[in-house]
Image (cartoon, rainbow, N blue to C red):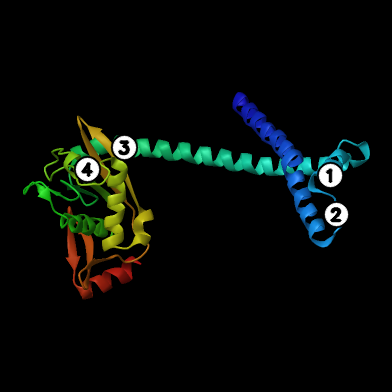
């Protein structure tokens, strides 16, 4: 713990020192520049910019004006300290997020082995029709329906690239349907499906991670419970889905209202 604490103190001291230099060498000259512009606007006898800057900056090396240099050094040091705290928090959060992502990715093989359940659903693809061997955008509605069921329930895991029997099919065919055939584009496509059928405000409640099973990539959409009732837009009608056992079931209007009143 001591070496770690010493490292943090050393790093913060570096930010304070660099901030102090920024205060003296950057913030002060910038402030003087603003002052000169104000003088030049309202005074016809104002000195040239270079004359003004040279005269003012030289004051800083005189003992009686050292308080000015100290003031800007303190201002810069405070800015440096704030930047240091922000950077440290950002790095800590990024490491924690990366660690969580790795843990979630490691869960995928085990989730596949356990099979489908009330919180796990397998889908062969996002938009590639395995049976007809072609692109079928209608499959996106199936994805949206499953996600809606998880949103309206307790959340869950939607694994894409795996058939109902737990056989890994991969994402290769799906990726060929995208403008950019990579997992980042696939993740954006999942978000687009949610936005189109369920609402863009729900995208923060899903998180897509990927794992390689053998030679094939598999995606897992982690769905958190939604903060509101989620209806799927299908043409001019809205439908309400919930998770029931290892399937997703549509509720009629009376059932949906009753369920929503208890759920939210």
* Residue 233 position within the rendered picture, expressed as x and y whole percent measured from the top left: 24, 67
Q: Is residue 178 above or below residue 168?
A: below
Q: Nearer the viewer, mark 3 or mark 1?
A: 1
**Mark nearer the N terminus (4 vs 1):** 1
| Numbered disc 1: secondary structure | helix
Q: Residues within 10 Å of mark 1 (few under 14, many from 20)?
A: few
**Is residue 17 toward the left or the right of residue 64 in the image?**
left
Find the distance from the CA under tag 2 to the CA under tag 3: 66 Å
Instruction: Please name the residue that numbered disc 2 is placed on.
Output: 46
Q: Residue at 65% across / 44% down in the picture?
A: 82
Find the distance from the CA under tag 1 to the CA under tag 2: 10 Å
> For residue 238, which quarter of the picture?
bottom left
Q: Nearer the viewer, mark 4 or mark 1?
A: 1
Mark sitting on residue 105? 3
Label 3 with label 4: CB-CB less than 8 Å:
no
> For residue 209, which quarter of the picture?
top left
| Numbered disc 4: secondary structure | helix
Q: Residue at 20% across / 55% down in the picture?
A: 140
Find the distance from the CA under tag 3 to the CA under tag 1: 63 Å
Q: Residue at 26% across / 38% down in the picture?
A: 108
Label 1 with label 2: CB-CB less than 8 Å:
no
**Mark nearer the N terminus (2 vs 4):** 2
Q: Is residue 201 above or below residue 92?
A: below
Q: Which corner quadrant holds the C terminus?
A: bottom left
**Mark nearer the N terminus (1 vs 2):** 2
Specify the farthest residue to the right.
64
């Amino acid at each position: 713990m001591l070496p770690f604490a010493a490292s943090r103190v050393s790093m913060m001291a570096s930010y304070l020192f660099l901030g102090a230099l920024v205060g003296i060498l950057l913030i002060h000259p910038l402030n003087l520049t603003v002052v000169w512009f104000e003088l030049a606007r309202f005074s016809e006898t104002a000195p040239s910019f270079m004359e003004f800057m040279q005269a003012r900056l030289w004051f800083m090396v005189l003992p009686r004006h050292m308080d000015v240099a100290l003031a800007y050094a303190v201002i810069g040091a405070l800015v440096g300290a704030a930047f240091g705290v922000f950077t440290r928090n950002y790095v800590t959060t990024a490491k924690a997020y990366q660690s969580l992502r790795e843990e979630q990715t490691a869960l995928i093989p085990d989730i596949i082995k356990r099979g489908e359940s009330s919180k796990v659903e397998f889908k062969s693809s996002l938009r590639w029709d395995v049976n007809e061997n072609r692109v079928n955008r209608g499959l996106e509605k199936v994805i949206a329906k499953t996600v809606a069921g998880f949103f309206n329930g307790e959340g869950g895991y939607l694994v894409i690239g795996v058939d109902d029997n737990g056989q890994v099919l991969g994402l290769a065919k799906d990726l060929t349907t995208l403008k950019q055939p990579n997992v980042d584009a696939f993740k954006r496509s999942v978000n687009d499906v949610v936005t189109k059928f369920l609402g863009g405000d729900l995208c923060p409640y899903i998180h897509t991670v990927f794992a390689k099973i053998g030679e094939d990539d598999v995606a897992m959409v982690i769905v958190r419970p939604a903060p509101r009732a989620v209806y799927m837009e299908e043409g001019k009608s809205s439908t309400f889905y919930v998770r029931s056992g290892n399937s997703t079931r549509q509720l009629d209007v009376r059932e949906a209202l009753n369920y929503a009143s208890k759920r939210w």
